[in-house]
Image (cartoon, rainbow, N blue to C red):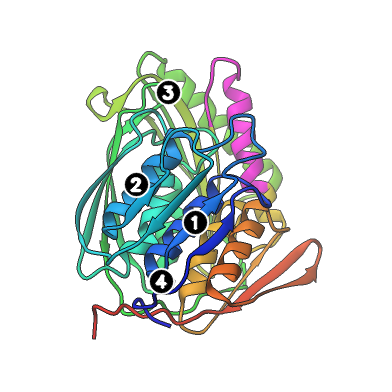
Amino acid sequence: MDGDRKEKFYDIDGSILEGGGQILRISVALSALTGRPLRIHKIRAGRKAPGLSNQHMQGIELVSRLCSGKLEGCALRSEELSLVPGTIMGGEYIGDSITAGSVSLLAQVALPCALFADGPTTFHLRGGTNADFAPPIDYLQKVLLPLLKRFGVHAELSIMRRGYYPKGGGEVVLKVTPVKHLTPLELVERGDIAGVHIYSYVAGQLPNRMSEEMAKWAEDEITKELGPVKVSKVVKREPEAAAVGTGSGIFIWAETSTGCLLAGNCNGSKQKPTHEVASEAAGMIVSGLKTGAAVDEHLQDQLIIFMALAKGRSRYLSGPLSLHTQTAIYVCEQILGLKFEVTSVGEGNVIVQCDGIGFQNAHLS
């Protein structure tokens, strides 16, 4: 299968399974890649505010520009849209959520497409860098992009400015080098814990002691639950020029002897004491490591589209599949015609595998 395929419309029900942005992001990316038109109906039909939000619109429009597509129905609260894609072209693109919408989600929808462009692509992505209900930008920088190197992905992420709710205003630069094809991923051995890293921060009007307290609470909980592991800490006040608005939070990631990366995070809020913020993030990383899984809950779904596109069999070991992951698998199977296998291996863990379609970049020889 290659990037020149053009057939009838893919017809996707936007209300199935997770019934939200995951369906939109993967469907739009695969439409742009395969060159086949897409129609999505019942968009977020089961949500309190059905239809497209601003966050979804900006990601879809970014991909449409990237592939010189013809986009219809991409409007606020719209419950149906269509995309007729053209050719994915490298260059410089701006994706602006306008609000504090997640820049990480903008990167998620655009990155797979840019890998099969005719040349290097640079994205200037603006919005919230540490938003609720989305991976923090630190997750992309410390976990996702390093692991995508195993697929042969070369992408560089620079955080120019952080942006917090409700102002947004953050900006990151994502530079992507195109590939001929993706190599398969093998991530089934967790290995031993090599180290745990804590990044605790405050910005704006919040006192320095908050970041110090969060880091200490998190370290104490991690060592209590996991024993004498190596823990490194960065406790930081974001410079005024490098952050917009007032915010706080903690991001924790662990490395293993086999190169696995797992993470946990929590954003601060007025309603949540610092020890609760630290405890939530530490709890995520501890529970993820105790399962023995090679990927965490947040990485599960983000790997699916790359596995589907890769040339050969990819596998990873994870805990129970999240609804986001089930949705990603469903959409890839519907659009690409492949099959994922999910096999239980005991203690709640599963191995997820598929034989990718070996998608080729038609621009590279």
Residue extending furthest right? 346
Q: Which mark is residue 61?
A: 2
Q: Residue at x 59, y 77 (%)?
A: 338
Label 2 sits on what residue type?
A: Glu
Q: Position of residue 175 (x, y in %)?
A: 25, 57
Label 1 sits on what residue type?
A: Arg
Q: Residue at x 64, y 44 (%)?
A: 284
Q: Which callout, 2 or 1, points at the residue further toward the start of the chain?
A: 1
Q: Which callout, 4 or 3, points at the residue further toward the start of the chain?
A: 4
Q: Is residue 30 visible?
A: yes
Label 3 sits on what residue type?
A: Gly
Residue holding disc 4:
34
- SS for dot 1: strand
**Residue 20 falls in image quadrant:** top right
**Range of residues picked out in magenta:** 267-286
Between circles 3 and 1, the one closer to the viewer is 1
Label 4 sits on what residue type?
A: Thr
Q: Which mark is residue 3?
A: none
Left or right: 135 as drawn, with respect to 74: right
Residue 52 drawn in magenta:
no
Left or right: 79 as drawn, with respect to 319: left
Q: Position of residue 256 (x, y in %)?
A: 55, 63
For the stretch drawn in magenta, what is the main secondary structure? Answer: helix
Q: Residue at x 33, y 32 (%)?
A: 162
Between circles 3 and 2, the one closer to the viewer is 2
Spatial separation of the CA atoms under disc 3 and disc 2 = 29 Å
Residue holding disc 1:
39
Within 10 Å of disc 1 (Cα), the crowding (few <14, some 14-19, many 20+) is many
Residue holding disc 3:
247
Spatial separation of the CA atoms under disc 3 and disc 1 = 39 Å
